[in-house]
Image (cartoon, rainbow, N blue to C red):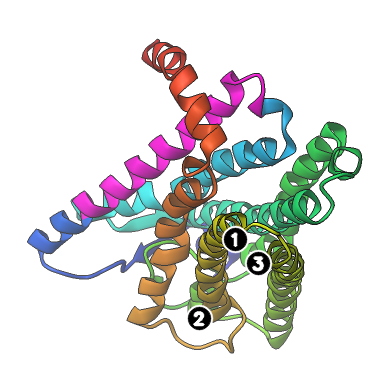
Amino acid sequence: MKSRNQSEAEMFILLGFPSSRQLQTVFFVVFLSLYLLTIAANTLIVGIVTLDRMLKKIPMYIFLSHFSFLEIWYITSTVPKMLVDFMTENDTISYHGCITQVYFFYALGITELFFLSVMAYDRFLAICHPLRYNTLMTRDLCQKMAAWSWICGFLSSLILIVPSSRLLFCGPRIIDHFFCDFIPLLHISCNQTSATDIIYYSFAWIIILYSFLVITISYIQIMKAVYCLPSQLGRSKAFSTCVSHLTVVLTFYSTIIFMYIRPSTSMLDVDKVVSIFYAVVIPLLNPIVYTLRNRDVQAAMKKNLSCLAIILCK
């Protein structure tokens, strides 16, 4: 078995999406477009909430601005490296670069789960307890919940990064994925143990299913409250909003549940396609569904767009 110094000095090969040079160029254009749109949409939301005096005092928009900022870094943890691989013959990544990517991808992904739970709870309070909402969800509590979502996400990821950094690799370092992920690393490691699998899957089940349970309970209560609204028009608008939110949430959770809490198996091409949804597509859909369709945001956007343009041009 190779020593740890030898192990750390070597490189990994990311297989990505093997195809012809022409198809690689098409992939590059498609994913670059998705990446730039995601960055632009989420940056716009952060800018609008920051500039608008009313929005930045409302808990829902405080959470959304944090969420959009998170999405910028979440998609950046994987896509730029993938774009470089599409356009160059160098599909390698260093040991430390791989471990760093694993850490930030999981830290940001777990933080997103916490924010989705917090935002669902916030909507539950606003819709089911409207008269007590300002008392229950104060700005101070909102800021603390946002801060703890970041802290818990980045601390929780350490549970995975410690066993990842202890893996040794004595065979071909070929990762059948487009980014460094914990499961592919386990597959090519020569010292993986059942204890590592137990830690990983216990962690995944607790984090994913707990956050999903919070969201499910919150939206069940929201749907009940919406159903009791006296106005048919009000019910239709509220249901439309809830359904669009739930569609994105269910897509996100179904893909990560498929990838991370099923029994360990070899990576298949279908796994890479599924990964595209939660790593690339969802970060673009979230700002559209959660914020850009919101009337308050649209009004603030019109009012502050000129100010935002001046800031971005500087």
Image quadrant where one finds the N terminus: bottom right
Residue 235 position in % (x across, y down): 61, 60
Q: Are marks 1 and 3 in contact (CB under 8 Å)?
A: no
Secondary structure at numbered mark 3:
loop
Residue 296 position in % (x across, y down): 56, 33
The residue type indicated by label 2 comes to His
The residue type indicated by label 1 comes to Gln
Crowd tier of the residue under label 1, counting other residues whose Cα lies within 10 Å: few below 14, some 14–19, many 20 or above: few
Residue ID for mark 1? 232
Residue 176 position in % (x across, y down): 37, 74
Per the rendered image, the range of residues in magenta is 28-55
Residue 274 in view in this figure: yes
Q: Which residue is pictured at 72% across the width and 33% down the height? A: 58
Q: Is residue 212 above or below residue 124?
A: below
Distance Cα–Cα, label 1 vs label 3: 59 Å
Residue ID for mark 2? 187
Q: Which residue is pictured at 60% across the width and 70% down the height? A: 167
| In the foreground, 203 or 215 | 215
| In the foreground, 1 or 26 | 26
